[in-house]
Image (cartoon, coloured by chain):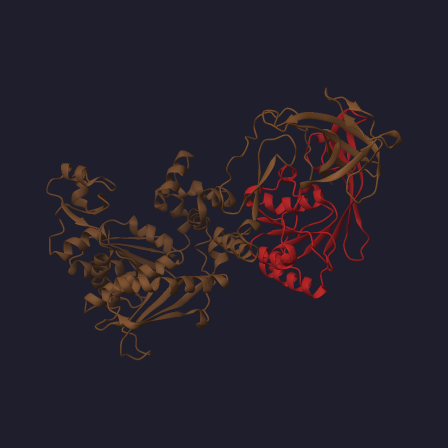
Amino acid sequence: MQDGTPSSMPLATHPALAGLVQLRAGASYSTDSATLALALLAGPSRAGGWCAAVGVADFGAEAAVALGVDLDRTVLVPDPGEQWLEVTAALVDVATVVLVRPGGRVAPSAAEKLSARLRKRGAALVVWGEWPRCEARLTATEPAWSGVGNGHGHLRARRLVVEARRGTAPPRRGALWFPAEDQSYRAVEPVVTPAVEGVA
Amino acid sequence: MRVMVVWCPDWPVVAALADEGQPTHLPAAVFHANLVQAGNAAARALGVRRGMRRRDAQSRCPELKVYAATPERDARTFETVLAAVEEQHPGVAPLRPGMAALRAPKRVSGGEPAAAALLAERLVGLGVWDSRVGVADELFTAEQAARRAPEQDCHVVAPGKSVAFLRELPVEVIEDLDAISLLKRLGIRSLGELADLPAAAVRDRFGSKVAWVHRVVGGAGAVPLATRTPPPELARHVDFEPPLENAETISFSVRQTADRVVAGLAAQQLVCTEVRIEAFCEGSSYDDPASSRDWLHPRWFTAADLVDRLHWQLQGAMRNGQSRGGEIRSPVSRVLFTPVTVVPDAVHADGLWGGTDERVQRGIARVQGMLGHEAVVVPVLQGGRGPAARQALVPWGERPTGLRPAGHPWPGSIPPPAPARVFASPWPAEVVGPGGRPVAVDERGAVLGEPTRFRPEPRGGWHPVASWAGPWAVEELWWEQGTRRVARFQMVGVDGRAWLMTWEAPGSWWTEAAYD
C-alpha cells in the first residue's frame, strides 16, 4: 500500500491520541484497554461515521458517549459466537471503524483477507486483544486514579501512560488524563513554552 | 455534457383534456383520493389549489372539469411529445410523464435558447401550449431550471454556474413535504442554507433524499460522475408462460425481477441511473424486442421505479401505434431490464465518511441473516442507578420502548466517570477485610469491616485494595415484593485498576463494571 492511495486516507482520531496514533483507512490497530478502544472509535464517530463493535458484550455506553461516540450511529453484535470473523467482515462494509474482540486465534491469512476488505472500503479495524498484523499497538500502563481515599470520595480522574508501538520503531509514549478532573479526555499538557503561556 | 430538460407543467391535466379532445384553456383538475393532485393555470386562477378537497374546489369553480388520476393516461399521452422531441434530437430519456431529458444539442445556430425555441414550436404544433426548457450541467439543475422558465421559453444555467443557481432556490424544490416543513421550522429557507449544514447531520436528520440534494448543491452533482459500463450479468429478465396481455398483470409479475436487478447491483455497490427496458412478444425472436426504451432517473432507480417505468412503457406501446417505445400487438412473453449506466453507490450516497443509510441497512441485514434478528443491537442510554441499568440494548430496527428518563436525578447513582466495561451479567466476587472476614453493610448503610483484599473475577487472583469509595446504598425495587438491598463500592487495586463492586444483602459480592 502506498501513501496517497485512498486506502491510506487518514481518519479522524480522538484529539487526546494526537501524536501517539493516527487512524488510517485500511489499517488495523490493537489495544488492551477498553477505554482506549472506545477512544479509537470516537474519532470517526465524531466526524459522522458509523462504528460497530463485535464480541464486546460489556460495552460501556455511557463511557463511550463521554468520549464522543455517537450511539445513533453505533451498532453492536455482542455475541457473534463462532462467526465473529464473518460478522466483522460484513460490518466493515457498514462502518468506518469496527471494534472487535477476537473470539479465538486468527490465522495471518484470514487477517490479510480482512485487511484487503478494509482497504477496499476505507475502514479501520480496532482489535481489543491480539491480532497478527497491526499498524500500531496501544498499551495502557501505569493507571493512577485520584479522588478516592479509604472509604471516602469517588473516582474522579485517572492519569494513564499510553504506549504506541509501530512495528520495530521505538514506542511512543504519552501521558493522558483519561479522564481529567473536569471529565474531559485529553493529553497531560506537554511542556508549555513560556511564549504560548504569555499569550494565553 | 450539457443536459436539457423539457417540462410540460400540469401534465396530468393536459393529458386528461387532450384525451377527451377538450381545449386546454378550460379550468380542469385531476383528483386522487378526493384531493386535487394537479390543476391547470385556469383552475389556479379561480383559486383551486393542490391538496384541496373536491367539494371545496368545485365550490370555488363550479365549471371545473374533474378527472380521476390515471398515470397510464399521462404516460400514454406523453408518448406523442417524446416522439416529437425525438424527431428533432435523438436520444431522449423520459424522466416521468410530463418531463424528459436529452443531451443539449451542441451545434445549433443560436445556441441552446434557439434549440429550445424550436422544441417549443414543435410542441405547440402538437397542441401542447405550455412547455418549458431548462439547460444546465447536470440533470437536477436542468430540471430546476425548467421549472423556473417562463411559458414556451427556456432558462439556461451557464456552465459552472449550477451551484450559484441552486443556492438561491427555496427548499420547496426538495419535494418531500415532511423535510420541507422541518427545514422551514428550523429557519432554513434556501438550498444554500441547507448546503451550509454538515453533511452527516443532514443525512441523519432528513434521510438520503435530502442528503442527496445537499451534496448536489454542495457542488458534487456538477462533477461528471465516473460512470462505467455495467457488466452484462446485471441484466435480468422474466419469462411469462403463458404470455401476458395486460400491462397491469405484467407489471405485477415483474416485481421480484425488479427487486433482483436492484439487489444484484447493490451486491456490487452500484446503483443504476439509466436502464433499458425491453419487452418481447410471443413468437418474436430474442434479438428483436417489440418495445425498447431507455429510461433515465434523476437520482437512481429503486425496484418500484423500474416497475413504474415498465408500466408506462407498456401503456404507451400497447395503445398507441406511433409510440417511439415500439408497438406491442401480441401478448408479452419476456421482459428484460438492462442497466445502461451504473455508478458506485458511494458517489450517490455518501461523502467522505460512513455509508448511506441503505448501505448500512443492507450490511446489517446480512449480519442479521447470519445470527438472527436479535443479534445486532443499538446501545441507548437511560436513567438508573447501576451502570447496567443506565444503558439498554435495542435490537436494530426496533424502536426503544419503556426507557427510564435519563435527565432525572437518580439518588444513589455513582458520579461520573462512567465505567468503560459494563458486564451484561455481574461476575460473582469476593471482598474481605483483615483476617479474611467478609465485608458487609448494615441496615443503616454503614460498612462493617474495612476491605483489604478483593477478587473481582470468579477464578481470578486476589488484589490488595489500594483505595476504595462507597457505599452508595440503595434499596432497589422497595415498592415490590423481593426488595434488593444493595450497596455499591468503587475498588482500586494496587495495580491501579478500578472496579465497581456491589454488595447485596444478605452477603454476596458482585463485580458490575470495570473502569478499564
Q: Nearer the viewer, residue B3 or A91?
A: A91
In the image, residue A31 sits, relative to residue B261, either above or below, namely above
Colour applied to chain B = brown
Letter of the chain in red = A
Left/right of residue B17 with respect to residue B471 in the rendered view:
left
Image point (14%, 36%), residue name = B59
Q: Nearer the viewer, residue A192 or B115?
A: A192
Where is residue B268? Give x, y as percent: 50, 64
Image point (30%, 52%), residue name = B146
Please indicate, yes or no, whether residue B94 appears anywhere in the rendered image: no
- Quick one: quadrant of the C terminus of chain B? top right
Where is residue A85? Give x, y as percent: 64, 58
Q: Nearer the viewer, residue B291 or B274?
A: B291
Where is residue B21? Give x, y as percent: 11, 56
Where is residue B220? Give x, y as percent: 47, 53
- Quick one: quadrant of the N terminus of chain B? bottom left
